[in-house]
Amino acid sequence: MFQNTKCECGHQNPPDTLLCESCGKPLVESDEPLEMRYDGVARRSQKRNPNPLDRVWNFFSSVRIAVIIIIITLVGASLGTIYPQGNNAEYYKEAYGWSGELYHKIGLSSMYDSWWFVGLLVMIGTSLVICSLDRVLPLYRALNKQQIRKHLQFITRQKTSYVGAIEGDAEQWVQSFGNHLKRRRYKVHINGTALLAEKNRFSRWGPYINHIGLIILLLALLARTIPHWTEENTIAVRDGETVQVAGTDYYVKNDKFTVEYYNETELPDRLKQQQRPKLYETHAVMYECVSSCDEPGIEPELKEVKQYEITVNHPMNYKGVKLYQIGYDDEPLLQSVKPVIEDVKTGQKYGPFDLPMKNPKTSFEVGPYSLELKANYMEFALNDEGSPVTKSRDPKAPAFIFIVKGPGLDENGEPYMYFPLEKDKERFSQDKINQAIASKIQIRVDGMDNVKFSSYTSYLLIRVDRALPFVWVGLGICMLGLLMGAYWHHRRIWLRIDDGTLSLGAHTNKNHFGMRSETTWALEQMGITVESDKLDNGGYNS
Amino acid sequence: MGKNRKPIQIVILLGVLLLGGYAIGKTLFASDDGRPAVGKAAPDFTLLDLNGQTHQLADYKGKAVVVNFWGSFCPPCVTEMPEFQRMYDKYKDKSFEVLAINLSEDDLTVNNFVGERSLTYPILRDANRVIERKYGLSQYPTTFFVKPDGTIMDIFVGGMSEQDIDSRVDQLLQS
């Protein structure tokens, strides 16, 4: 069907234009107030004979389609909340019976990662871009070059309009009306006896800025699937220990771990006599590796970058790497001892010498004695054949075998088995194993000052989310757009005086009541008293 | 307008196709949790052996490699180590290597252990469980059979008999 799109003012409009882009004359006959959406301009992509590319474009350009996609997505998203997500088949069968089984079978148990749900999000994103682009560009153009003198029909068919006679010089009247509007922060443009006053145009860009924010948000969520952009690991750090933060170049030291328990008066009766932790805290130091980070056999060079007391819900945060306190273990582990060697006969003590549980030196000179460390066991045990073995790599029941040389001992040295922990010494009968040498020398710890324990293991959850800043930026822009569009109203007043007759029309994108009262106020300043309601042209949104 | 419309449409639709394709593709193909799995590339590592020599897995491309994680505290590890030694001797002339990574034990323990058993294949020293974590180990011993192209042919958790090792190494050498 051929449609004549040339306006009587001589302007050639694109197809589907509702109001002439130049003079504003309505191109569709009706008595209703004008459809002012997008100022009556055609969507950017509308054209005759669309090719396949245009058809795809037009599909996504439709707000109706966008709303349908959003509704489908919302319904889909709500299905995912019926039962918990991400469990295995047995769980759904056991917990919810046949409906749970069905739920899992049709793929709703992991639906937020399903191809169709992600597909819907992709379609929403596409529609956001295309819908916005197709509307914001024509709207920008239309608002940027507005004609001051509009077609009479355009003015009188505005939702707020007034027609009446005025007295005196028309141009002067327009000037003074304009001055009144300026007091209400309108930008006033005058062309002889025609006037255009406008304020808060920027609020029209709100929705598009909002959409930009949403697109950034969607892209940020997509970015989270890039390897290494999000990571979640748990590490165990004993107090005093430094451990690499898995997946990063950072190291964290558990400088000290403290637990505070509830005292009796704070606990209800049924929990009395129990140790209930009230607050546990890791005094953590974060280091960054500066060199030799990945070289085997060389200790990495670390530089302290941050100290923080990590408690539950108060994670340490350094450059997007977050460390959360998720638990602790209070099994003590021996870290090091400083034993002495005692000559049993004379009672003379030599030492002490430093014996760490991990990677100790292998030879020691203590007084007249020299010790050669032959073997060590972290968790000493005897296997089925009666040979000494270690049951784990943590010093839970450490044992050391020394070859000792010195006064009164064989010159080739005599073996001496040493259990630093008193309970192990008795359990494995150290003196019996050592036999004769036990009556000559004793290796033992003199006082608790010479024993160093690590009392706690702190469990930390490491979370790296490099997309998070972008999520916040997206949300921020989204919110800014929402505020711009919601809080401010775009208001325009057109008027023209033809042979002593004033025709005034006003338009706003929301709050027509406010628009009318502002118009009433302005007219009143000019000595025209009219009831606010009388300006209403009827139609929608009253 | 008009003039730039078509290029803009093409650019935007292509962008959507790329990003959307990536997003949807992610959901269709097995999610990559970074852990080694059969068919995937074995994570690279650079470690020292007992002689202080550097071994990097990537340098063994073109060779069939058995990567075995072991600790002196794990009885099945201890049992299977002589089997690996036999395998090592048997296929020494072939394009084959055994890399046995110790589970972050201390020097004395490892040296004593290897010395007593006169093992001649490279024993590598992990520190602070870094490589062990990289390989996502949860049980010991665990053995990875790495094809000459660097991908994992099989992962075996638990102690292996001579036959278990033999059949896999045969398969590995054929690939």
Image (spheres, coloured by chain):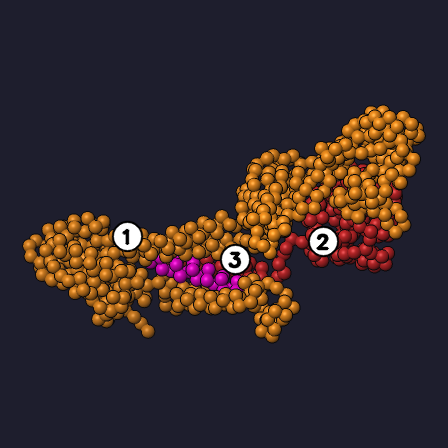
Chain colours: A orange, B red
- Residue A213 at x, y = what percent? 43, 53
Looking at the rendered image, the disc whose residue lies closer to the viewer, 2 or 3, is 2
Q: From which residue to which does the magenta span run?
A: A117-138
Question: SS of the residue at dot 2?
Answer: loop
Q: Amino acid at mark 3?
A: Leu
Quarter of the image for the C terminus of chain A: give it: bottom left
Q: Earlier in the sequence, mark 2 or mark 3?
A: 3
Q: Which residue is mark 1?
A: A200
| Quarter of the figure with residue A369 | top right
The residue under the point 16% across, 65% down is: A534
Question: Looking at numbered disc 2 in the image, what kind of residue is underneath it?
Answer: Ser
For the residue pair A247 and B94, the one nearer the viewer reads as A247
Residue wearing tag 2 = B138
Image position, residue A526 (x, y; %): 11, 54
Q: Position of residue B175 (x, y in %)?
A: 78, 57
Foreground residue, A94 or B166? A94
x, y percent for residue A381: 83, 47
Q: Residue furthest left?
A: A168
